Image (cartoon, rainbow, N blue to C red):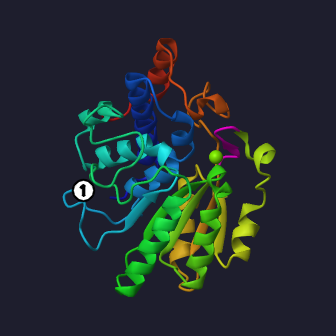
């Protein structure tokens, strides 16, 4: 499936509206972290990047996807539903008892979810293992991962980075959601994790810095990553937390927050008018 940019823009609105409807309905969830990765997720599933089959989620030759920043899963659930992995009506069961879509990704419940994540740092380490396994099997599938910049605080991330370069996992493509915020405040104040491009490069990775909301740059970065076969790839995406709605953009209180009735009216006005 490869949408043109206009269609990708519509789908991103659809995904953002799904996220708001889900969080509003269950009165819990993380809109801000979903919105900074919406274009990345949209490009992956609708821009001709990830090779998957909604009719056969466990197809052995598929590319894998690991949402290392697992709390942003509503955006991925929306993309999976809109791609046909499960009915879109199921989206409003988010976080409810017996639902297949829980507050963090769970491999044994949700069609299209390749790894259980949420404990920060573990997702990228799992992805490194997946990429190594595919290399051993001489399977030419790719492993795509999305990691948060706040998540880079975790020591396991840097162990994973070292292991990936040691094993020359060029089949691993990680998107770093560099939105400059984490749950407790700004990255600069909390951890001083600046110059992540340079830091990751010194760990032996191929790094590419882009605007994480620009579909052309996302596609070109993936093409460049696939063109080399000696290093793992980190696409450092400059993003805006809460991107897409005027009252959520760059407001870190939306890391975990429920919209009011009035805010939902505005969200529907801005994000509606797109295909169901
Ligand atoms: Mg962040």
Task: Looking at the picture, tell me which residue is in the foreground, 65 or 42.
Answer: 65
Q: Is residue 140 visible?
A: yes
Which residue appears at 65% of the width and 53% of the height? 149
Residue at x 64%, y 57% (from the top left corner): 154
Q: Quadrant of residue 22?
A: top left
Picture coordinates of residue 124, whole percent (x, y): 52, 63
Report if residue 270 lies within the magenta region.
Answer: no
Q: Is residue 219 visible?
A: no
Q: Nearer the viewer, residue 128 or 251?
A: 128
Where residue 34 sits: x, y (%)?
51, 41
Where, quadrant-wise, is the C terminus in this rendering? Answer: top left
The part of the chain drawn in magenta is: 178-184
Position above or below: 143 against 181: below
Which residue is the site of mark 1? 54
Q: Is residue 119 left or right of residue 202?
A: left
Query: What crowding class fits label 1: few (fewer than 14 Cα within 10 Å), some (14-19), or many (20 or more)?
Result: some
**What residue sits 33% from the left and 48% below the top?**
80
Q: Is residue 139 above or below residue 19?
A: below
The N terminus, quarter of image: bottom left
Residue at the limit of the structure toward the top, as seen here:
262
Q: Residue at x 59, y 30 (%)?
A: 254
Query: Residue 142: image x %, image y %?
Result: 42, 73
Magenta stretch encompasses residue 183:
yes
């Amino acid at each position: 499936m490869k949408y043109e940019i206009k269609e990708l823009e519509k789908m991103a609105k659809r995904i953002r509206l799904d996220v708001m409807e889900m969080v509003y309905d269950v009165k819990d969830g993380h809109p801000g972290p979903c919105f900074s990765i919406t274009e990345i997720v949209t490009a992956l599933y609708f821009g001709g990047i990830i090779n998957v089959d909604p009719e056969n989620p466990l197809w052995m030759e598929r590319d894998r996807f690991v949402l290392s920043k697992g709390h942003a899963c509503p955006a991925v659930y929306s993309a999976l539903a809109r791609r046909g992995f499960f009915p879109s009506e199921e989206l409003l069961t988010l976080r409810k008892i017996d639902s297949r879509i829980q507050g963090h990704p769970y491999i044994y419940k949700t069609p299209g979810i390749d790894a259980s994540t949420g404990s920060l740092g573990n997702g990228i380490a799992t992805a490194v293992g997946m990429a190594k396994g595919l290399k051993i099997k001489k399977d030419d599938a790719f492993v795509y991962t999305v990691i948060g910049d706040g998540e880079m605080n975790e020591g396991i991330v840097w162990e994973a980075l070292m292991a990936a370069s040691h094993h020359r996992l060029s089949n691993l493509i990680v998107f770093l959601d560099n939105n400059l915020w984490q749950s407790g405040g700004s990255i600069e104040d909390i951890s001083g994790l600046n110059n992540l491009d340079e830091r990751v490069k010194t760990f032996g990775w191929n790094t590419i810095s882009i605007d994480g909301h620009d579909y052309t740059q996302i596609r070109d970065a993936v093409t460049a990553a696939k063109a080399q076969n000696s290093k793992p790839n980190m696409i450092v995406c400059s993003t805006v937390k809460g991107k897409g709605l005027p009252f959520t953009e760059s407001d870190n209180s939306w890391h975990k927050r429920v919209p009011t009735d009035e805010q939902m009216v505005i969200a529907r006005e801005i994000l509606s008018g797109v295909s169901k």
